[in-house]
Image (spheres, rainbow, N blue to C red):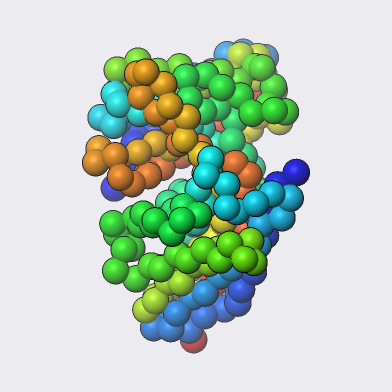
Amino acid sequence: QLQLQESGPGLVKPSETLSLTCIVSGGSISSSSYYWGWIRQPPGKGLEWIGSIYYFGSTYYNPSLKSRVTILIDTSKNQFSLKLSSVTAADTAVYYCVRGGIDYYGSGSSDWFDPWGQGTLVTVSS
Amino acid sequence: SSELTQDPAVSVALGRTVRITCQGDSLRSYYASWYQRKPGQAPVLVIYGKNNRPSGIPDRFSGSSSGNTASLTITGAQAEDEADYYCNSRDSSGNHLVFGGGTKLTVL
């Protein structure tokens, strides 16, 4: 059974860089059938897609975060990471790592995220 | 602002049927996926694609799509279905993903 686990500091100072790692177990991160991503949820707010990465390195980022986000993949360690620079209090959120997939139909396609990591709360505060 | 619009809150009587909707122009080209989030827990995928349920999701959950609207239907809502529900799809450019604002479902 595939499992994802986020790790990283729970407290980051304003203007510094938030760094998280997602360790994937029970399956290979190098599968061409899936991609990997980060999603966050600020307290009291909804879900926000941060970005996604394929095993061969192609990345896609939320346009509103693109200038500050870097997602990398390390197939040798079966893990991927998130870096978010110049953080402010608005970046305080529960951060989730996910596996993503795409199903294709004649009438369109569907992205989906499953499973999700348990999530890790990152607070930006001095 | 989200390119996918959901009603902030919906309520349903125990055992009745409820439909949660998600509207957006991109839904004319892409199917939505739906996630259930309960307090203190990670979101769970409940519906994706035309009407697919992951293993372990009860068959009272179903999905449909028409025009610019995707719907999640719970037939015979149970107390444990009380949660926040989020839709997700690609944006109009097709290059990025976006979530709806979420719908809080209350089971009365």
Side (left or right) of B68 relative to A38 = left
The answer to whether residue B72 is visible is yes
Above or below A5: residue A7: below
Side (left or right) of B14 relative to A86 = right
Residues B56 and A104: in front is: A104
Q: Which residue is drawn at 42% across and 71% down?
A: A84
The answer to whether residue B10 is visible is no
Estimate the x, y position of residue B9 in percent, counting from the top left: 47, 33
Above or below B83: residue B71: above
Q: Quadrant of residue B35?
A: top right
Residues A77 and A12: in front is: A77
Estimate the x, y position of residue B88 in percent, counting from the top left: 43, 37
Residue lying furthest bottom:
A126
Estimate the x, y position of residue A8 in percent, counting from the top left: 61, 73
Q: Residue at x 45, y 64 (%)?
A: A71
Q: Which residue is drawn at 41% across and 21% down?
A: A105
Q: Residue at x 63, y 32 (%)?
A: B82
Above or below A108: residue A115: below
Estimate the x, y position of residue A116 in percent, counting from the top left: 62, 48
Above or below B94: residue B108: above
Question: Looking at the figure, which quarter contains the C terminus of chain B?
Answer: top right
Count of numbered tags: 0
